[in-house]
Amino acid sequence: MGRVVPFMWNGDWIDVGYPRDILSANYVVLNWLKISRISTKAEIASTAIVEGPVIIEDGAEIDHYAVVKGPAYIGPSTFIGKSAFVREYSSIEEGSVIGAFSEVKRSSLQPHASTGSYVLLIDSVLGPNAVVEPRVTVMSRIEKDLHIVRQLPLQGIVKKYRKLGIFVAPNSRIKASITLGPGTFIHLDGTISNIVSTT
C-alpha cells in the first residue's frame, strides 16, 4: 500500500469537477505555449494556414484552406476539413474530426469526437465519440438578464461578454441543422437540459 505525501503547490490549479472546467484547464495549459511544435508526420496542405503557437501531433491532417490559429492543440490522427477554422484555446484530441467549413473556438473535442460541415462550435466540450451533425450552430453569449450557477470558465476575452457553449455527453449525437443556446447539455439518451436561467 502506498502512502500520501503532502506537497505545497503555488502554480496554476483547475479543479475539473464539471465539464465546463475543461475549458478553463485548456485556457491555462494552452497559455503556457510559447512556440509551435509540428510533427513531421502530420500532413498539412500547401494552402492551409497555421499560426502559432500550436502543437500538431503525428498523423494529424489539415486539409486545403483550413486555418489553425494558436494557442491550440491538434492531437494525433485528427482531421481538420477543407476551409475549417480552428481558433484560439481549442484542443482537438486524438482521432477527432472537424468537418469542412466549420469553425471551432475555445472548445474541446475529446478523443474521436466529430463535427460535420458548416458547424459553429464555441466555448463547448464534446465528449469522447460524440457527434455533431452538419449545420449545427452554438450561440454562446449569455445576456445580462440570464443567470448561471457557478463561475464561468476562463476565456481570455477583452470585452465583458459572458459566454458558455454546449456540453455533449460521450457517445451522443446532435441532429443536423439546429441552433443551441448557451449552457446546453446534451445527455446520452438525447435529452437536453440547460444551466442558464432567467432567475
Image: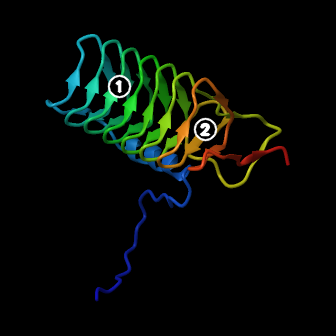
Front residue (pair 44, 170):
170
Measured as percent of width and height from the top left, residue 90 is found at 43, 36
Q: Is residue 106 visible?
A: no
Mark 2 → mark 1, Cα distance in angstroms: 21 Å
Judging by the rendered image, the residue that carries numbered circle 2 is: 165
Front residue of 51 and 169: 169
Label 1 crowd bin: few (<14), some (14–19), many (20+), radius 10 Å: many
Based on the displayed image, in which of its 4 quarters is residue 154 positioned?
Answer: top right
Identified at 66% across, 46% down, the residue is: 191
On the image, which quarter does residue 182 sit in? top right
Q: Is residue 167 left or right of residue 141?
A: left
The image's mark for residue 80 is 1
- Asked if residue 175 is positioned above or below residue 67 in the image, the reply reads below
Residue at 28%, 10% (x, y): give it.
Answer: 47
Which quarter of the rendering shows the N terminus? Answer: bottom left
Way the structure is coloured: rainbow
Check residue 101 in the rendering and tell me which mark sits there, or answer none. Answer: none
Q: As displayed, is residue 47 above or below residue 166?
A: above
**Local crowd at mark 2 within 10 Å, few (<14), some, or many (≥20)?**
many
In percent of the image, x 31 and y 42: which residue is there? 94
Question: Where residue 114 appears, x then y in whole percent?
Answer: 43, 34
Which sits in the foreground, 3 or 12?
3
Question: What's the residue type where badge 2 is placed?
Answer: Gly
> Label 1 is placed on what type of residue?
Ile
